[in-house]
Amino acid sequence: MSFAARCSRNRRVNQYGVALPIVLLIVSMMLATAAAWFEAALFEARNSGAAIDQLRSFHAADAALVLCTRALADGTAITPPAPAQPGEPQGWRRQETFGAQATAPLRSWPGSVRPPQCFVEAWRIEARPAVRAFLVTARGFGSTDDAQSWLQMQLVLEGTRIERHWRRVVARPF
């Protein structure tokens, strides 16, 4: 066997072991990329589920708020007695008071764990003693008790004139 034939044979033998590490490296990179995509997909699914739950609770609270304020404006709701001191009512800030005295204008809400609730408090406005004013607080639920939205409407009734002032409660009361 000539020298050139031996060298070329040795080169081929040395190249046989190179393919396996390269293939393993490429497969491991593909596996790491697939795992990262899977994690990103799981994160997005959880995130969109939480957003849907928040929307569900918001719409439930909004529906309860509309129904309760409409009943107050029509005079079909039981109105609480006027408070002795002026100032914005604070009963809605205590969840135990809210839970005990809240009403459910709807039997259920699609996808919610509990029906939406509303709590009506009378409000005495010192600058306008002739008006009847109410603070209506509504609470809507998502698929869990932790997914809640709180909305409020300040309702001022003066003869046939009705003023509505809407606001969202950013942090739920404790």
Image: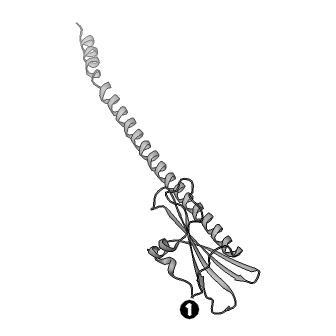
Label 1 neighbour load within 10 Å: few <14, some 14-19, many 20+: few
Mark 1, secondary structure of its residue = loop
Decide which of 49, 160 is in the foreground and name it: 160
| Residue closest to the eye, 81 or 160 | 81
Task: Left or right? Give the position of 128 relative to 26.
Answer: right
Q: Quadrant of residue 124?
A: bottom right
The percent coordinates of residue 49 (x first, y second) are 50, 52
Q: Identify whether 33 is placed above or below 169.
A: above
Quarter residue 119 falls in: bottom right
From the viewer's perspective, tell me whether residue 29 is left or right of residue 117.
left
Task: Tell me: 158 left or right of 62.
Answer: right
Q: Does residue 164 lie above or below 27 as drawn?
A: below
**Where on the picture, by quarter, is residue 29?**
top left
- Residue 142 in picture, x, y percent from top left: 51, 58
In the rendered view, would you say 4 is above or below 77? above
Q: Where is residue 37 drawn, in percent x and y?
A: 44, 42
- Count how many numbered circles sit on residues in the image: 1
Q: Is residue 172 visible?
A: no
Q: Quadrant of the N terminus?
A: top left
Which residue is disc 1 drawn over? 84
Q: Nearer the viewer, residue 35 or 151?
A: 151
Q: Residue furthest top?
A: 1
Say above or below: 44 vs 88. above
* Residue 133 drawn at (x, y percent): 64, 83
Residue at image position (30%, 26%) is 20
Q: Quadrant of the C terminus?
A: bottom left
x 24%, y 17%: residue: 10
Left or right relative to 134: residue 162: right
Residue beneath the point at 65% across and 72% down: 69
Name the residue furthest right: 160
Amino acid carrying mark 1 in the image? Ala
Residue in the foreground of this view, choosing between 127 and 96? 96
